[in-house]
Image (cartoon, rainbow, N blue to C red):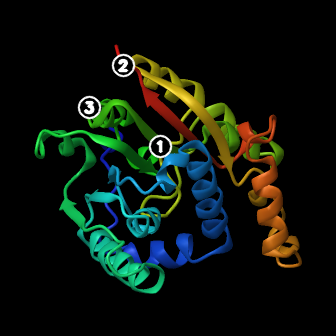
Amino acid sequence: MTPPEKVDRNFDELSDLFASNIYGTPKGHIRLQVLWQHLLQSLPHLQDKTPLTVLDAGCGMGQVAARLAVLGHELTLCDVSQDMLDIAREFIGDYIKQHGEAGDAAEVCFHHLALQDMPEVGQRTFDVVLCHAVLEWLAEPLLAVAALARLVSISGHLSLTFYNRDALIYRNLIRGNLRKVKSGEYAGHHGGLTPGNPLDPATVIAWLDQQGFDVQTRAGLRVFYDFIPRKDREQLSLEDILELELEYSQREPYQSLARYIHVVAVRRSTV
């Protein structure tokens, strides 16, 4: 039997489920908080008064973009899912009303298209390009990285988060799922919310190098939370968990076993 053709994942009609089962859970909260803190640590100029041009490619609910909008940056968002864009538009508007000051928040531009098509829109580049938890849903992630590279200005930065294949292998090993590890097939159930294309960090970093980027900083998102038995998680304080997730997010060997890897890379002045 011929295997089904791999296609990019679109979350139309699943956006509400995605919002509740991913973003609306402790694991989603931990991922967002560690990501945000590492982003600000890596790019402290995000908190300066000078607005930057920022693209959020595959923006999802727009949670990071909302925070950047309040800081006054010029935001462009794109997503292949119109449902996700609608959620992001509403979320960002509400966030600005709650956290912004009059006149501080920048306008936000939305594009309903795949990130691979963004290089053709306006033929422009950005100071910062975000692509968080998107590559693992794509059939050809290398092509997406190449498209993202074209969107980053000289000496600009790319913030990339992806589902870590090494963590998935380790999780299956300690659970005794040896056949799954031997097969190398880690895709979740068809139609589910488990990414179908986990990525090898060394491979992603090699892709970035090929595209003319140097990785400046790296962190793991959820370095231990996912390994805690579910019954034990409920007995622990989320604040305590987050404190230790932040503490160990950039320490080895914990960083490399995190569910997600976040890298911030700078585009070299010459390629």
Question: Which label's residue is closer to the chain start, 2 or 3?
Answer: 3
Residue under the image location 37 percent in, 44 percent down: 129
Mark-to-mark CA distance, 2 and 3: 13 Å
Give the numbered dot on residue 182: none
On the image, the x and y values in percent for residue 191 come to 42, 63
Q: What amino acid is found at the position of numbered circle 3 in the picture? A: Arg
In this rendering, position of residue 28 left or right of residue 77: right
**Helix, strand, or loop for circle 1?**
strand
Mark number, residue 159: 1
Which quadrant of the rendered structure holds the N terminus?
A: top left
N-term mark: 2 or 1? 1
Give the CA distance from mark 2 to mark 1.
Answer: 17 Å
Residue at the spot x=42%, y=37% of the render? 157
Residue 154, how many percent across, how many down?
32, 27
The amino acid type, in three-letter code, at marker 1 is: Ser
* Residue 216 seen in this snapshot: yes
Asked which secondary structure carries label 2, the reply is: loop
Badge nearest the viewer, 2 or 1:
2
Most foreground residue, 196 or 88: 88
Kind of element beneath mark 3? helix
Q: Is residue 255 above or below residue 154?
A: below
Mark 3 residue crowding within 10 angstroms, few (<14) / some (14–19) / many (20+) = some
Q: Residue 259 at x, y = what percent?
A: 66, 49
Label 1 to label 3: alpha-carbon separation: 14 Å
Point out which mark residue 150 bears.
3
